[in-house]
Amino acid sequence: MPTIPFYRDGFTYPAADSLNTIIQENNPCAQTVFYMTWGRKYGGEQCIGSYCSPVFVDYFHMQDSLASAYMYMTLSNNALCAPVGISWSNSITNGDPIDLFAADASHPSLAGSYLAACTFYAAIFQKSPVGITYNAGLTPDDALYLQQLAEATVLTDPEQWNIFPPVPISASFTYDLDESQASFTNTSVNASLYLWDFGDPITGVQNTSSLENPTHHYSGPGTFIVTLSAGDGCRNEIAVDTIVIMETGIRDLTEDEVKIFPNPVINTLSIDFMHTDIFHTYSLINLDGKQLMNGELNIHKQKAQIKGLSVLPAGVYLLVLTGENSRLERKILISN
């Protein structure tokens, strides 16, 4: 139908517009993809009833007509195109080393269907299909050739098919503490919608906020996991950090007052105290807020060690040391 002017202009184009409208009304985050089909192997005149296409002299003549129609539908609907017909064109230009057509010179062979699938994979995921292990019964060499063909067709210049990489979204934030009140500064990129969880369930509905830069008064001392979900209404990214609210009269020691080394650490973490204040306990918390290790500190001559860290997965952890009049929070990196 896209090659027959009467049906193309009176039916195909309006139907494509209507279908895309229905899709967007039901899900504004959906992306319409137009399936550019391929021409008949030998071209020829295509008729439906009394309405006919031009007499196409060969495959490429007919494919040009199909490509023009599908790209018009793609661009007029701000959609993307899976250029299957162009993948076929490129194979035929190479001498058609693998016959893509069934016996009727119109429908696809197994190889033709596989090439179509690889083209869709590259267009939808914007990734190369080269290396996919499923070959649908084709020989490994034939499957690899068709994967490479789809990769070159789609990914050499994806913008010609109206395929653009999604705008990256990153979620991040900083905060300042004034006793038990935290002021959050959103530093997310390419986001317009925010949902905060302050990790303070005692405050109920006040535990969350949709403001860009909220403040929160914590209900009491403790360690709280703050989560920010930032997105554009279709995609979201998550950022997590830990806030420690201390009791009145407890101070957080500075790096000049206590030395924690080595950092990164593999197995044993050493702690040197530069004054008479001592800590009693320690805990290690991952970035999801889960306490993975804790215990009593054995301090001798203002020195202590935490051993056995190599059992934890490599990554960043929050080390919290607590005592009667002191509290210390440091991020450490465990490598193994």
Image: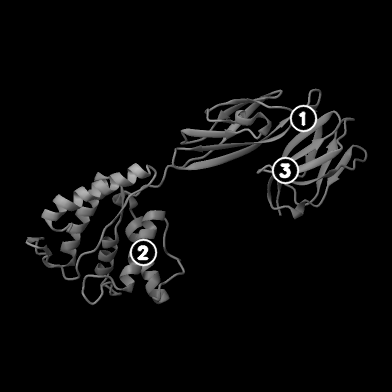
88 above or below 328? below
Residue 227 visible in the picture: yes
Residue 270 at x, y percent in the picture:
82, 44
Residue 217 at x, y percent in the picture:
66, 24
Distance between mark 3 and mark 2 Cα atoms: 45 Å
Quarter residue 303 falls in: top right
User: Which of the two labelled residues, at mark 2 and mark 1, occupies the earlier sequence position?
Assistant: 2
Q: Residue at x 66, y 34 (%)?
A: 201
User: Which of the two labelled residues, at mark 1 and mark 3, occupies the earlier sequence position?
Assistant: 1
Report the side of 98 relative to 7 (left or right).
right
- Please name the residue that numbered disc 3 is placed on: 285
Q: Residue at x 79, y 40 (%)?
A: 260
Closer to the camera, 274 or 135? 135
- Residue positioned most to the right: 301
Q: Residue at x 49, y 36 (%)?
A: 189
Mark 2: give few (<14), some (14-19) or many (20+) Cα within 10 Å.
some
User: Which of the two labelled residues, at mark 3 and mark 2, occupies the earlier sequence position?
Assistant: 2
**The disc labelled 1 sits on which kind of residue?**
Thr
Which of the numbered marks, if any, corresponds to residue 229?
A: none
Residue 292 at x, y percent in the picture:
74, 47
Distance between mark 1 and mark 3 Cα atoms: 20 Å
Disc 1 on helix, strand or loop? loop
- Please name the residue that numbered disc 1 is placed on: 254
145 above or below 249? below
- Please name the residue that numbered disc 2 is placed on: 117
32 above or below 326? below
Quarter residue 249 falls in: top right
**The disc labelled 2 sits on which kind of residue?**
Ala
Mark 1: give few (<14), some (14-19) or many (20+) Cα within 10 Å.
few
- Residue positioned most to the left: 50
Distance between mark 2 and mark 1 Cα atoms: 59 Å
105 above or below 51? below
